[in-house]
Image (tube, helix red, strand yellow):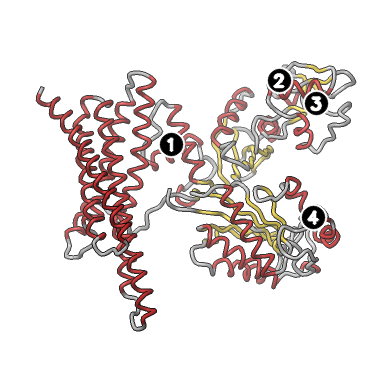
Amino acid sequence: MSQQIVECVPNFSEGRDLGKIKQITDAIEAVSGVSLLHVDPGADTNRTVVTFVGPPEAVAEAAFQAVARAAQVIDMSKHKGAHPRMGATDVLPFVPVEGVTLEDCAHLARQAGERIGRELKIPVFLYEAAASRAERTNLANVRKGEYEGLAEKLQKEEWAPDFGPRRFNAKSGAVICGAREFLIAYNVTLNTRDKSAASDIALELREKGRQARRPGPSPYYSKGEPLYYEKDRFPCGSCEFVGNSFEATVQHCRKTHDYDLHQLFELNEADASQPVGQPVRRKGRFRFCKAIGWYVDEFRRAQISINLTNFKVTPPHLVLEETRKLAAERGLVVTGSEVVGLIPYQALLEAGRYYLAAQGRSPYVPVSDILETAVFSMGLNDVSTFEVNKKVIGLPKLSPDALAARPITEFADEVSRDTPAPGGGSVAALAGALGAALASMVANLAHKKPRAPEHERLLLGIAEKAQGLKERLLRAIDDDTNAFSTYMNAMRLPKQTPEEKTLREQAMQDGLKLAVKVPFETAEHSCEAIKLALEAAIHGSPSSMTDAAVGTAMAFAAVRGGVWNVLVNLKSIKDQSFVESTREKCLRLLEEAEELRAQASGLVDEKLSG
Ligand SMILES: [Zn+2]
């Protein structure tokens, strides 16, 4: 995926004065490339949660500008509110959405924190994935003592800030800056108005778990008799095991159920050093999962309201499937589910693939088909409307005026006009995309009747790679036309003084290298597409062998075309070692493509003649 998206969700200690909040969000929106998604002021908490997204550098810049503005308009020495807080900008988390890792976001948080400390003279603590030491990972721990206790906290050696002065800033307090995973707010709806039914399931799902009980005749676990740890009697809570010491049960839980009972106590804020008399703890089914049951008047139904704090470990579709099982055991039906706010593209894509695989279908089909399968399977349109374009963050989108978004006839017409672009480069990319599409088609068709498990795996491998190449090559249709504009813009730079001439020359050379890079990648990806189409011809059904062969021919045209476009632009590049090595790579690519195409042609011709 070529696009990179980071989300930033700062909390500002002002929830009443909308004018001040507007000044802060204006500072965010002034940064180009950033989109402000949501502003949520709370009067009681006197705090506003702001959500914005964009490319990493732009988001970091907007975050800094927002912190700077908040430092001007908010005075913490006069702040009162119902939510714990430490500064004017209280928390500043960076969240990976698309094409970036959590570690990338931690890096971004450190950079932003350093700048805030240095330029704004505000103490900065790093937390969660950006934390500099273990005891700073937990936000509540860092914020303990709040603004009122900050002056004293800064005196302690172990609470020296990560960045900025170790001096109390009365007006701004401190910024707690970090990185965390995307939070998905997800509700599962039941066919009942009974809140306690939803609660009984919520307690089974959530990481914190619940008090263990002796199961009674009712399928509702909450109806069983509650268990307590007694002297010499420490039930496991998750199975029938009873330890004669707490330590024995801790060992048992680790070995048999792979969890740390001490951690479970911590999650429940219970003291594990004195277990006797305390409720027996039963672990929940999902990590990074918070859940409660509630009744929603608007829908006249009970819901399990869920927060997933790491969808990469605990994805929504798996929680939904477990909920469906738990509901069925209780004679209930899940009528659907609901995403509150946004869901990352990757999470919905994984869900769609999961349900396709469960149906025995290839999960490597067009993205729109995968997402549609997810929406149907999860019942996302049950209580509210789920519009993929509005609800999915990080969705790969073509701009409406993109060549690749045009109908075929319009594209062909556009190529045929008396303008130099779109030309051979874009047509080559399209040919490569169609070659990859045919490889995927032949593999997916054969996947319907695989000969053996390894044959099935092989076909899925072809379909997966071919879908990826198809997406990239479709994007290259526009990239190729756009790449040349960098060079054209450089040509228009001023050339009066010797300095201007040097700068212009450099910009033109850079532009030319970009104009080489795009067709070279088209050629490289298309060569991969020939390989896949050939494999599809060999391992697919004999009846679709000619389709695969057409794929190899189309993709070959793309390699040939890509290489021609590289060579023509190389002529004006002055960096001789770059020219030589690129030319060399092109020749090798062409040789390989030629060989693969000949192999495919031979295969089909032999079959047709026999
Ligand atoms: Zn057990």
Query: Which residue position holds label 3?
Result: 280
What secondary structure is found at the residue carrying circle 3?
Answer: loop
Indicate which label's residue lies in the foreground, 4 or 3: 4
Amino acid beneath label 4: Trp
- Ligand 1: quadrant of the figure: top right
Left or right, residue 425 beside residue 495:
left
Query: Which residue position holds label 1?
Result: 373
Amino acid beneath label 2: Ser
Q: Distance between the Cα atoms at labels 2 and 4?
A: 52 Å
Is disc 1 in contact with disc 4, using a CB cutoff of under 8 Å? no
Left or right, residue 590 beside residue 95:
left
Q: Position of residue 346 (x, y in %)?
A: 49, 43
What secondary structure is found at the residue carrying circle 1?
Answer: helix
Looking at the picture, tell me which residue is in the foreground, 210 or 254.
Answer: 254
Amino acid beneath label 1: Thr
Query: Which residue position holds label 2?
Result: 218
What secondary structure is found at the residue carrying circle 4?
Answer: helix
Compared to residue 433, the image places residue 356 above or below, namely above
Indicate which label's residue lies in the foreground, 1 or 4: 4
Amino acid beneath label 3: Val
Q: Name which residue lies at 76% across and 58% down.
A: 85
Q: Quadrant of residue 576?
A: bottom left
Indicate which label's residue lies in the foreground, 2 or 4: 4
Q: Distance between the Cα atoms at labels 3 and 2?
A: 20 Å
Compared to residue 301, the image places residue 226 above or below, namely above
Q: Earlier in the sequence, mark 1 or mark 4?
A: 4
Compared to residue 219, the image places residue 437 above or below, namely below
Is disc 3 in contact with disc 2, using a CB cutoff of under 8 Å? no
Q: Distance between the Cα atoms at labels 3 and 1?
A: 41 Å
Q: Earlier in the sequence, mark 2 or mark 1?
A: 2
Q: Distance between the Cα atoms at labels 2 and 1?
A: 35 Å
Q: Earlier in the sequence, mark 3 or mark 2?
A: 2
